[in-house]
Image (cartoon, rainbow, N blue to C red):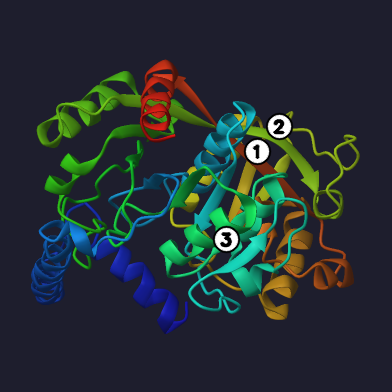
Amino acid sequence: MSFRNWATAYFHYLTGSGPHRCWDCPALALLSGASWLYRKGVLAKYHSIASHPERQEHVPAVVISLGNITVGGTGKTPTACMLARRLQAQGWRVALLNRGYRSQREQGGAAVMSDGQHVLLTAEEGGDEACLMARSLPGVPVLVGRHRAAGGRLAVERFGTQVLLLDDGFQHWQLYRDLDIVLVDGTNPFGNGHVLPRGILREPLEQLARAGAFIITKRDQISQDRADAIVRQLRQYNRQAPVAMAIHKPSRCLSFAAWHEGRSDGAGELRPDGQPVLAVSALGNPASFERTLSDAGFTVTGAIRYEDHHQYSRDDIRQMADQAAAAGCPLVTTEKDAVKLPASLIHEYDLPLYVLSITIEIVEGQETIDTILQAVLEDKL
């Protein structure tokens, strides 16, 4: 194991909720001190805007934020796509605003990833999550950039947008929003209860009071008692916001070539039926993806994990090919990873790679979420 991989693994161990050893105390003390400073800083930043509402920027559209209070994957991207489709089906003109992680093409604080008809930027140029949204949402413009208000104004001016979905926006206080929907990972809702870097919280749990609604994701991966316990914990900080439950639902598993070409005729589809596979991902919570594969009917014989937002290189593709050959089974990755994988290298190495498409389905509380959305839309439009 390289030093970088060892350091990453050790950090995850330190910030986990499991028991620690006595010789971890100096590192834990250092992280706790940094966590105290981080907590002070993030609260100071929030209150500097909360106490001066005139500092928030407004755009002439309904702004609905989707976010979380932790780092790591809670399912924001598929949830944003699900909500965009529902609102679009109801006749609203919708656009998505994404931070554009590692975006290289934004100008003036924003760039158009997709105009709703064509994907205009690559994953490298506009960010992997934004690229996935653009591919998944025909008819819905996707804009990227650090300056969300600039992206919102551009969406309204260029596309006549009525509803802006602010992806990963719970901590983006500079832009006024009409509704904050907070996603909670059912398998790891709040980590060890500490803020970064001692834990995985982006801000103290008390800030959950700002949420207008909660969606607990991965409901199918936790027990009823666990789900009830999460709801009770949410109610300690927010007694009003409704709580819905959602699951990650696999829709299909296509060969990379068929997925890349956008084919929907069933060609190149990999059927589960106990099929052995190697899971490949660069996610905040890779174990959840591997669990989803198993629940879908695949036999996960091993996993190749990279850091979240990892950019795949030629060496990575070569190593994947070697491990697939050694295991004698295909590789399966996520759509979020697939948009970053270079098609030319996949073809060059004849990589037996498949892409699992995931959708979010609300299994409890859909009517309540619809009621809140309708109230917000009717109040402003």
Write down the residue under mark 1: 299
Report the residue marked by disc 2: 274
Mark 3: secondary structure: strand
Q: What label sits on residue 369 in the rendered view?
A: none
The vertical placement of 212 against 27, above or below, is above
Q: Foreground residue, 17 or 260?
A: 260
Residue 331, given in percent of the width and then of the height, sits at 72, 53
Which comes before the other along the chain, label 3 or label 2?
3
Residue 106 point in image, percent of width and height: 56, 75
- Above or below, 324 relative to 124: above
Q: Specify the quadrant of the image occupied by residue 130.
A: bottom right
- Quarter of the figure with residue 300: top right
Rendering coords of residue 74 (x, y %): 42, 45
The answer to whether 55 appears left or right of 308 in the picture is: left
Residue at the image position 22 percent from the left and 64 percent from the top? 55
Disc nearer the start of the sequence (2/1): 2
SS label for mark 2: loop
Q: Taking 264 as reference, is 276 left or right?
A: left
Amino acid found under the numbered disc labelled 3: Leu
Which residue is under mark 3?
143
Q: Is the residue 21 above or below the residue 240 in the image?
A: below
Give amino acid for label 1. Answer: Thr
| Residue 355 rendering spot, x and y as whole percentages | 72, 49
Mark nearer the N terminus (3 vs 1): 3
Label 2 neighbourhood size at 10 Å, few (<14), some (14-19), many (20+)? few
